[in-house]
Image (cartoon, grey):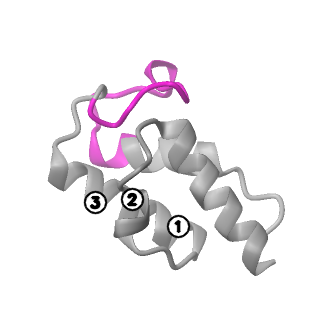
Amino acid sequence: MPGKDVFKTITTCIQELLPSITDHQINAQMSLKDLGANSIDRVDILLAVTEALAVDIPISEFTGAKTIGEIRDLFENKIKAIA
């Protein structure tokens, strides 16, 4: 899936599920929890990004990802692996 902007997809999904957040409030060093996402919101965001990118990653693989940047890296690595 070359050309996919993973970070933009993540921010779009965050904004859809947390409408009070603007893209200017989101940076790669933040966690979803920093943005006010509860545990259900975080799972919903990850599932939405997984669907938007058409990548199959089990939610359990995200347990070590603390920041949005680390989440982005997981998605990018998976996309590279299947390309």
Q: Quick one: 12 or 27, which is closer to the camera?
A: 27
Q: Earlier in the sequence, mark 1 or mark 3?
A: 3
Q: Which residue matches tag 2?
A: 46
Compared to 76, does 36 lie above or below?
above
Q: Secondary structure at mark 1?
A: helix
> Which of the 4 quarters of the picture holds residue 53?
bottom right
Q: Amino acid at mark 2?
A: Leu
* Front of the two marks 1 and 3: 3
Residue displayed at 48% across by 68% down? 50
Q: CA distance from mark 1 to mark 3?
A: 12 Å
Do the residues under discs 3 and 2 have CB atoms within 8 angstroms? yes
Q: Secondary structure at mark 2?
A: helix
Q: Which residue matches tag 3?
A: 44
Residue displayed at 47% across by 61% down? 49
Q: Amino acid at mark 3?
A: Asp
Q: Quick one: 9 or 60, which is closer to the camera?
A: 60
Neighbour class for label 3 at 10 Å: few (<14), some, many (≥20)? some
Compared to 12, does 83 lie above or below?
below
Q: In the rendering, at what x and y percent does residue 62 appear?
A: 41, 58
User: In the rendered view of the protein, which quadrant contains the N terminus?
Assistant: bottom right
What is the magenta range? 15-33
State yes or no: residue 13 in magenta: no
- Residue extending farthest top: 24
Q: Amino acid at mark 1?
A: Ala
Neighbour class for label 2 at 10 Å: few (<14), some, many (≥20)? many
Q: Is residue 21 left or right of residue 67?
A: left
Q: CA distance from mark 3 to mark 2?
A: 6 Å
Q: Which residue matches tag 1?
A: 52
